[in-house]
Image (tube, grey):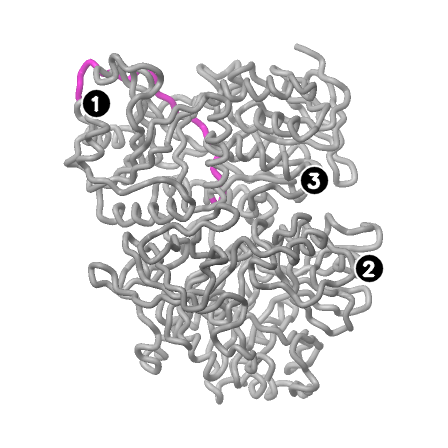
Amino acid sequence: MSTVPAHARVVVIGAGIVGNSMVYHLARLGWRDIVQIDKGPLPNPGGSTGHASNFLFPVDHSREITDLTLDSIRQYTELGVFTQSGGFEVARTDERMQELTRRLSSARAWGIESEIVSPEAVAERVPYLDPSIIRGAFWTPGVGVVDSQRAGTLMREKAAELGALQVFPMVEVTGMDVESGRIQRVRTNSGDIEADTVVVACGVWSPKLAKMAGATIPLSPTVHQMISVGPVPQFAGTSGEISFPIVRDMDTGCYERQHGGDMEIGSYAHRPILHDPEQIPSIAQAKLSPTEMPFTEEDFDPQLEQALELMPDVLGNPDVEIRYAINGLLSTTPDGSPLLGETPEVAGLWSAAAVWVKEGPGVGRMMAEWMTTGTPEYDIHGTDIARFYPCQRSKVNVRARSAEGFNKIYGIVHPSEQWLSNRNVRLAPMHRAEEELEAVFFEAAGWERPQWYGSNASLLADYGDAVMNREAEWDARWWSPIINAEHLAMRERAGTVDLSAFAIFDVTGPGALDTVQRVAVAQMDVGEGKVVYTPVLDAAGGFRSDLTVMRLGEDHFRVVTGGGSGNIDRKWFSDRRPDPATAQVVDRTSQLTTIGLWGPRARDILGRVTQADIGPEAFKFASCHTIEIGPLAVLASRISYVGELGWELYVPMEQGARLWSLLAEAGRPDGLVPVGNGVYGNTGRIEKGYRAFGAELDAERTLVEAGMMRPRVKTADFIGREAYLRQRSEPPVTVLCTLQVDDHRSSSGTVRYMLGGEHISGPGGEPLVDGRGRHSYVTSAGSAPSLGVHLLMAYLPPEQARIGNKLAVDYMGDLFPVSVVATDATPLFDPENARIRS
């Protein structure tokens, strides 16, 4: 055992595919004095990389995961360790065939060659498959397998050739020291290493390592069963590892693939089998490796029977025997996505965890760029480890969601599908009242948030066909026409919205103005009582967030942002304080609740419960004042995300229920209705052309492309200013547009409604590619009940961004005609914004 060096610029813990990719890309970007350690031997230290099946299917409904996978395939190919075989995802049911048409639309949206093929076409390429068992398949020729251990060795060697890397196998971490909130050293059984940057890239052991530093990496080691059978006569005489396409039997949660003369069969359909990171056996204790656990045959038997149905010529052969069988450990997370970035608890401690072989090199490159410049090439906000709140990082939640998510890996997951486990954790103070109103709750950042209210079902008769009911079950799943009825009632009268899921934090102290001015694009040196909507950019001019800021005092600013990105935003502000000694960032989310009141009668309703002057001159748009509502002191902010007159009303959490009831009583004469997030987050905003972070806005989009360029740029410096000025001087390479669906009728005669993520093409299916090489796709979709149409938002190549331009959207195997109706942020509903400013 070698003694580790006393100092390092960065310590990378883990020598699987992610750790190896990290050290190579850090070295490539100029980092030196890199130390990599692993408690196992090389080239296979015993982690998931050593037993993973190592095949790569590039198509995912997530653009982020697809980007990382495609990047990884490119890197594997450059290293000479990728073998292209092609792959089929086969369907046994009509429901799965419908899902495969969605998959094809996603493939086209990401520019990946794929097609739907017949059972006979599958059997031509996979002659040992019984075509009578399946209805069809999704064929992707770019699928292949990779030698990930060889890839890791090559990456370590390249880093060492640059004089950047020292590698220490058989060295175990025993502790980590943190001082003043920052990592300082890594303690090992071979000595201590001083380092103020540490990367935890050790897969299923990552939670154990993070805990040593007082941080949390919320993943669960989860069993994925796999067997290898052989010898397979059909593979005799083939050369190399694989000659036949890989088959994913999606409806049974299994895959079958050639591996030399054997066939490998893996399952994601068995019961979730979770392990504690602390209980994974040591290398000395493990019979095979620490992540190759004893096989539980009874869990696999049903899947083996289903595999026999599909491939009877192979698996029905008595000479083909099981030669290897494991319960292999992999990492699952509470939302199914990787855990990347600097941990929110400890500065300098980075997570590169819950990453599979198919994403490994892409993650390594993005992480290295993130650590070096702060601006990775791809938007990776959906995998930022800071996205989780403390309640989501709890062991109970991690285990519950990991177990539930395991069987979704090959599942058919609806875009709006809700998690069922570990609910009712964060409840608004008016939750009981909402239950009495028959609220249907969706979860947002752990909060139970009404999506619509069953008590509003009577509105359906009032508005008739204007609610735009949906006849197709998929389109109507996790949706209700009540949403559109609530929308129309709010536009006609008024509605209240539970906004408790907002993330709220204060920036205070003598350096507060300098902090918010540095982070925000908009001018923050405004008068007290002003409310400012502002984008937040990274140094490359891409979106980090968009949010509102209230100036409550000379040295007091309140930031309000979406719950999904609230933790990330708070960390962004805190990390970018010019002088941390003079500015504090304090989370107020659990102290305050927010209720929205909007609609043409909002002023009348609020006027019944307050003596304050809330007239249009005394209480102007984009201002905030503390007013008394009944016995409550309420911070009222006149701003709107639904394009109506009204206010966001902030009170201490314990007073929220009283405020809700006061408004409900005051609004009774005017027909006030409770309104769910189906209106607030979708129909209300899409009619107004409001952009949403994570949909239209992300790190790969700019203010110019999003149609949000302001007339002037403030003189005060802010993050991204130089890039923004450059972007303003250049023509955009893509333009955010709003499109209207012209004909909803499918080829089968069913009226269909798009949900988001679909491919946008020319009228005949011709691909549209912007200046970045991106294909056009739907970023948001939703009803516009006030206009009687269904709207889509999408980035188009500039030459296609013309009012009236006829295009098509690819949905469920059909092309539906659409027209461009807006090429900037001008709203289709109330384009003069008369209602919001009334």
Distance, label 2 to label 3, CA atoms, is: 23 Å
Look at 63% across and 21% down and name the residue there.
159
Look at 35% across and 18% down and name the residue there.
241
The quarter holding residue 785 reads bottom left
Distance, label 1 to label 2, CA atoms, is: 70 Å
The amino acid type of the residue labelled 2 equals Gly
Label 3 belongs to which residue? 346
Label 1 belongs to which residue? 315
Magenta segment: 314-335
Q: Number of marks in the image? A: 3
Q: Secondary structure at mark 2?
A: loop
721 to 52, vertically: above or below: below
Q: Give the class, few, some or many, for how many residues have Cα within 10 Å of label 3's Cα (few <14, many ≥20).
A: some
The quarter holding residue 112 reads top left
75 to 686, vertically: above or below: above
- 487 or 397, which lies in front? 487
The amino acid type of the residue labelled 1 equals Leu
- 594 or 838, which lies in front? 838
The amino acid type of the residue labelled 3 equals Val
